[in-house]
Amino acid sequence: MNNLRSISQIIEPQTAIEGAGVKLRRSIAPRASNEYDPFLLFDHFAFNDPIEGPIRGFPMHPHRGIETVTYMLTGSTHHRDSLGNAGLIGPGDVQWMTSGRGILHEEMPRRGPEGTIYGFQLWVNLPSHLKMTEPRYQEVSAATIPAYEKDGVRIRVVAGKVEGVAGPVAEIAASPLYLDLQLAPDHEWTQPIPGGHTALAYVFEGEGVFSGETIEAVKLLKFTDGDHIHIRTENKPVRFMLMAGAPFREPIVPYGPFVMNTLEEIKQTLAELRNGTFIK
């Protein structure tokens, strides 16, 4: 590994309101320019202010053509869908939902015992030949997510591999790496990432030196191409989500909760919603 990825972009998350008034920090959102291919959206949600009143969530809504990945740190999210699935995504759990040809689902956050809700949602694109695939879920409980631990470094492996430790999420077209990394002060870590894959890091706690640049939370980083990234800490710990995946290099047409390849496919989707044939 001799081709270090440097930081090509530093993104300051912006406040957005989604669903039934859910306030969140958004770093990237679906755009036709598709510069984070295969990643479409990254949201960081937290409800930690009691004066916000009752928690609102994401009432029943459709998705097509994408995968949504929910990762909870504290609190939980109750979900149910048009296929009859229902369940609770609790602290440390992950739900990797492949919406494929179409699904209606709702996600309703609930505070944990400490009164907080904290988590992330990532959207991953599907290639054109899988846009209309059967919907499916990979529900991953916290207990089944393996952690790689070594002297001041702790990595929860949701998808991909770290030093032979493989994450439980499998058979995803983008061959993603999705990791929750923590480094204690005065430690370093080198993470291999296949050349050509898009790589993003969401720094949400502490401070670290990423490829020579000091980054404080909260920021989303995009990296140049290469075969690895290097992170070290000085006098503070750092925690960040690392996402990498193979780009599909296909044109996209995003429209709300749908991401297809052509405008005609979006029109078809809207027609099916109107005439009641969206869910088979």
Image (cartoon, rainbow, N blue to C red):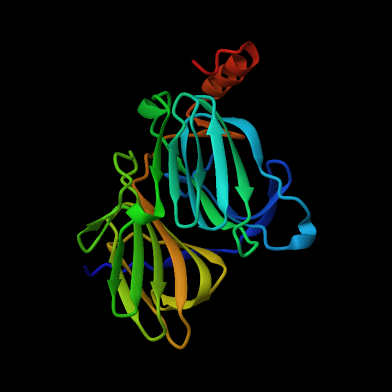
Question: In the image, 6: left or right of 106?
Answer: left
Where does residue 65 sit, x and y in percent of width and height? 47, 30
- Compared with 215, 156 (above or below) is above
Q: Residue at x 46, y 70 (%)?
A: 239
Tell me where residue 233 sits by quadrant: bottom left
Question: In the image, 78: left or right of 133?
Answer: right
Give whichever of 185, 36 is nearer the camera.
185
Where does residue 129 sit, x and y in percent of width and height? 36, 26
Give whichever of 270, 205 is nearer the camera.
205
Q: Residue at the front extreme? A: 113
- Compared with 253, 96 (above or below) is below
Tell me where residue 131 sits by quadrant: top left
> Visible in this render: residue 279?
yes
Q: Residue at x 37, y 44 (%)?
A: 247
Where does residue 127 sit, x and y in percent of width and height? 38, 33
Count of numbered circles in the view: 0
Q: Residue at x 21, y 68 (%)?
A: 1
Give whichever of 7, 268 is nearer the camera.
268
Where does residue 133 sit, x and y in percent of width and height? 39, 25
Q: Residue at x 41, y 71 (%)?
A: 182
- Compared with 123, 49 (above or below) is below
Question: In the image, 7: left or right of 148?
Answer: right
> Visible in this render: residue 158?
no
- Compared with 75, 135 (above or below) is above
